[in-house]
Image: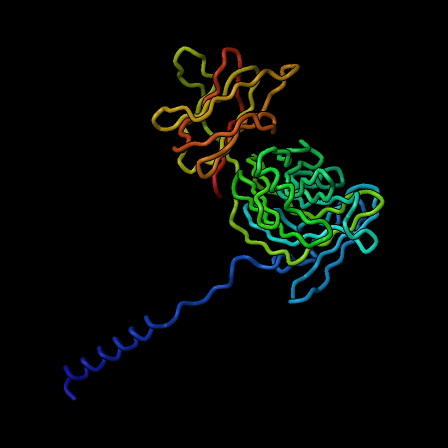
Amino acid sequence: MSTCRLLSVWIAMLASLGCASSRQPPVQTEPRAQPLFESMPYDTWRVIGAPARFSLDAAEGGATVLTGRGPIPSNGFLASPRPLGDFRLEVDVRLGSADNPLGDKMNSGMQIRSAEKGGAVGGLQVEVDPSKRSWSGGIYDERGRLWLAPLDGTDAAGEAARAAFRRGEWNRYEIECIGPRIRTRVNGVACAEWYDAVVSGLLAFQVHGGPSCEVAFRDARIEELGSHAWRTLASGAGASSGERCAWSARLAPEARGVRVDVVGAGRMALTATDGAAIVDVSFTAADGGAARRIEAVWIDGAGAVLIDGRRAARFAASALPAEARVLGESCTAARPEWLSRD
C-alpha cells in the first residue's frame, strides 16, 4: 500500500472514531437534591437544649422519617453537624401523636441559619403551628428578634397561607434560602418571604418544650446552592449636595448587601448608576450613644433595609444599587461591609 493510501486510511479511521465519540450520549449526573441524611449522616447530628428523643426510621418507598418526642421542660433540637449557606429544603411534616393526633397545644419548627446559643439553638425558624393562629410557614427568630414574618396579612394571600397547613396530616414544606432572601411554601402555597443579613448557619429540627410534643419529618431532601459572605468594605466620607455625608461607598455589580454601624441619627440611601433613588430610610439615635447596625440587602430586583435586625423598609429596584450613603449632620459610621456570593 502506498504512503498516500495508508495516510488516507488512518485519516478515515480517526474521523470515524471522532464521529462515534461525538455520538455518545451525555454523561448523566445525579440530581443535585439528595436525601438530607445522606448529605449529612444522622449519626453526625447532635441534640442541643432539652433532651428530646429523636429517632430515624425507614418509611414506605425508601424514604426516612425523623421523629422527635417530648415531654421536655424546654425546647430541644437536633442540629446539623455543619452550617449551611444557600439551599433548598423539602420535607413532609406532621405534628401529633397517637393520643393527640391533631397536635392540640403542640408546636414545632425547623431552624435555618441558626447557631448554638446558651446551650440551646437560636436563630431563624420556619414555624409549624397547628393552633387557631395558623402561622405555619411563618418566620420566627428563636431566642432573638422573635416574629419577623408572621402570617398576619388580611388579604387573600394571607388567608391562603394560614389555611395551607392541614392538622393531623403530612404537610409538604419547601424552604429556599438564597443570599439574603428566605421563602417558604406549605403544601404548594406561598407563606413567607423575608430578607435578612444572616446568610449561613445550622439547620435544626425542634421539639417544643411542654407536657406533650411529637413531630415527624419525612423524606427530607436538600439541594445546596453555594453560599454568600460578608466582606470588609473600603470606603469613607463622601460628597453630598447640601447635607453632610458621614459615609459612602461605591458598590460592585455583584453586591447583594451593605451594612454599617452608625452612631447618631441620620439616613441610609441607596442610588442606582444613573443617580436615581432606590430607597432612603431615616433612623434615630440609639439610647446612650450606642451604635445601630443599618443593613440593606437585595437580590433579583427586591430587598429590604433593616435597623438593628428589624425591617424598616422594603424596596424594589429595576437597576442594581450602585452607591450607598449614610447622611446626617452629627452621625458617624464604622465597620462597613458588603455582601456577595462566595
Depth check, front residue: 44 or 76: 76
Q: Residue at x 62, y 60 (%)?
A: 38
Task: Establish if 274 lies above or below 178.
Answer: above
Q: Residue at x 74, y 55 (%)?
A: 67
Q: Position of residue 269 (x, y in %)?
A: 46, 22
Q: Is residue 85 left or right of residue 212?
A: left
User: For residue 283, which quarter of the picture?
Assistant: top right
Task: Establish if 56 lies above or below 242.
Answer: below
Q: Position of residue 234 (x, y in %)?
A: 45, 28
Task: Establish if 220 lies above or below 337.
Answer: below
**In the rendered view, how is the structure colored?**
rainbow
Check the image and name the residue furthest to the bottom.
Answer: 1
Q: Quadrant of the image for the N terminus?
A: bottom left
Q: Is residue 33 left or right of residue 62?
A: left
Query: Is residue 62 something that shows in the picture?
Result: yes
Depth check, front residue: 171 or 263: 171
Q: Number of labelled discs?
A: 0
Q: Position of residue 181 (x, y in %)?
A: 53, 39
Q: Residue at x 77, y 42 (%)?
A: 75
User: For residue 74, which quarter of the picture?
Assistant: top right
Q: Is residue 124 left or right of residue 2?
A: right
Q: Position of residue 338 (x, y in %)?
A: 49, 33
User: For residue 9, which quarter of the picture?
Assistant: bottom left
Depth check, front residue: 221 or 86: 221
Query: Is residue 232 something that shows in the picture?
Result: no
Check the image and name the residue furthest to the front.
Answer: 156
